Amino acid sequence: MRILITGICGFVGSTIALRLREVVPDAEIFGFDNLIRPGSERNRPRLAEAGIAMRHADMRHASDMDALPAADWVIDAAANPSVLAGVDGRTSSRQLVDHNLAGTVNLLEFCKARRTGFILLSTSRIYSIKPLAEMKVAVEGNGFRPDFSASARPGLSGAGISEEFSTTPPLSLYGCTKLASELLALEYGDTFDFPVWINLCGVLAGAGQFGRADQGIFSFWINSWLRRRPLQYIGFDGRGRQVRDCLHPRDLVPLLQKQMATPTALHRVCNVSGGIKNSISLAQLSRWCAERFGPMEVGSDSQPRPFDVPWMVLDSRRAEVEWDWKVETPLPDIFAEIADHAERHPDWLEISNP
C-alpha cells in the first residue's frame, strides 16, 4: 500500500506518518509539505530516518499535485488550523480559502485521476457558532458544563456534540472552508467512485506541537508556564473556565488503518475526539501546570474573542460503535509528554512563533 500524507512535516502529519511506519512497516509512506509553518522543517530529519520520503510541494498549486506519484490513499493533514485565520491580521481571507478549500479541490482532482482513496482530517469547528456561543452553562470543578435544562438542542448531550448538531453558518471562515471541503470530498467520491472518509477532530495535542494561543493551545500554555511567560484568560468570565477536549493524533492511526481497509460503512463522517474523559478547562490546566512547575499568576481579560465558545466537547460514539475506535492516550499522559518536550527544548516557543 502507498500512503500519501499532506502537511507531513506538521505536528499532526508527522505524528501520523511516524506511527503508521511503526504499525504498517510494509507500507510505502510518503508526503509533501510547503514548510510555511515555523518549526516544520525540524521534522524532516525524523521522517528521513524512518524511511519516509518528503517532497516540497504546495497543494494550492495544481501543477505540484500533478507531479506527485500515484498513491492508494491520501490522508489530508494540511490546513491553516486557526479559527481566527483570515480575520486576525496574520493571513488574509483569500489565503485561508486558497489553503483550506482550493487546496482540497486539487487533492480531490488528484484522487479522481488515480482512483485514490481520500481521508480528510477535519474539525469540530464545522459546528454552528451561534448556538454554541449562546449555550447556557454552569460551573463545575472550575470549568463550564452545559445546562441541558436550558440548552436542549438536537445533537447536544452529556456525551458531547454529535454529528447531528447544526452546521448552519456562521461557523467562522475557517470552519466554512473545512465544511465546504467535506461536502466537496463526499461529492467527488460519490461521483467519481473513490472512497472518502471524514474525521472531525477536536483539539489535537502532544509533544512537538507548535504552540500558539490560536493553534496548539495546550502546548502553548505548558511551554509558556514553564518559562514564566505572561498568560491570560480571555473571554466569558475571564477565569479560564472554557472547556475543550483533547486527543493525541497517534490515537487516530488505528481508525485510519481500518478506514483504508474498508470500502464502505454506514456513515462517511465521524467525530473523532478526546470526548468528556479527555476534556479540560484552561483553569484546570493551570492547576496541572502549577503542580508540575510551580504557581504563576495568570492575567484576565473578560472581553470575548471572535468565534470563542464556552464548551466544545465532541461525542465520538459513532466512531466507537461503527469502527470500534477509542481514545488511548489520557490527558495526564499528553500533558506530561508536552512538558517533557518543553523541558528538553527551551527555545520551542521561539521556533513555533518567531
Image (cartoon, rainbow, N blue to C red):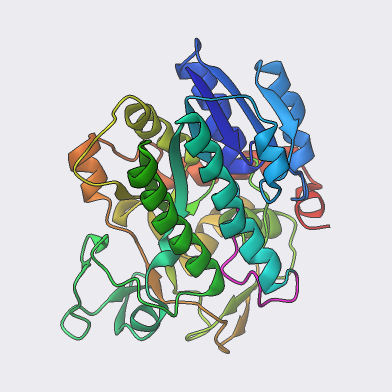
- Looking at the picture, tell me which residue is in the foreground, 41 or 26: 26
In the figure, is residue 346 to the left or right of 160?
Answer: right
Residue 193: horizontal and vertical position, in percent? Answer: 35, 37
Rendered image quadrant of residue 131: bottom left
Q: For the stretch drawn in magenta, what is the main secondary structure?
A: loop
Residue 278: horizontal and vertical position, in percent? Answer: 37, 52
Residue 287: horizontal and vertical position, in percent? Answer: 51, 62
Residue 58: horizontal and vertical position, in percent? Answer: 72, 45
- Looking at the picture, tell me which residue is in the foreground, 52 or 278: 52
Whether residue 213 is visible here, answered yes or no, is no
In the figure, is residue 236 to the left or right of 222?
Answer: left
- Looking at the picture, tell me which residue is in the foreground, 161 or 267: 267
Whether the magenta-drawn stretch holds residue 122 is answered as no
Q: Residue furthest bottom?
A: 303
Residue at image x 22%, y 49%?
A: 317
Residue at image x 53%, y 83%?
A: 235
Q: Residue furthest top?
A: 26
- Looking at the picture, tell me which residue is in the foreground, 14 or 313: 14
Task: Please provide the residue range marked out in magenta.
Answer: 79-90
Whether the magenta-drawn stretch holds residue 81 is answered as yes
Residue 288 lies, with reference to residue 96, above or below; the image says: above
Image quadrant where one finds the C terminus = bottom right
Residue at image x 82%, y 54%?
A: 350
Residue 25 lies, with reference to residue 268, above or below; the image says: above
Residue at image x 66%, y 15%?
A: 51
Residue 58 lies, with reference to residue 122, above or below; the image says: above
Residue 23 lies, with reference to residue 130, above or below; the image says: above
Rendered image quadrant of residue 254: top left
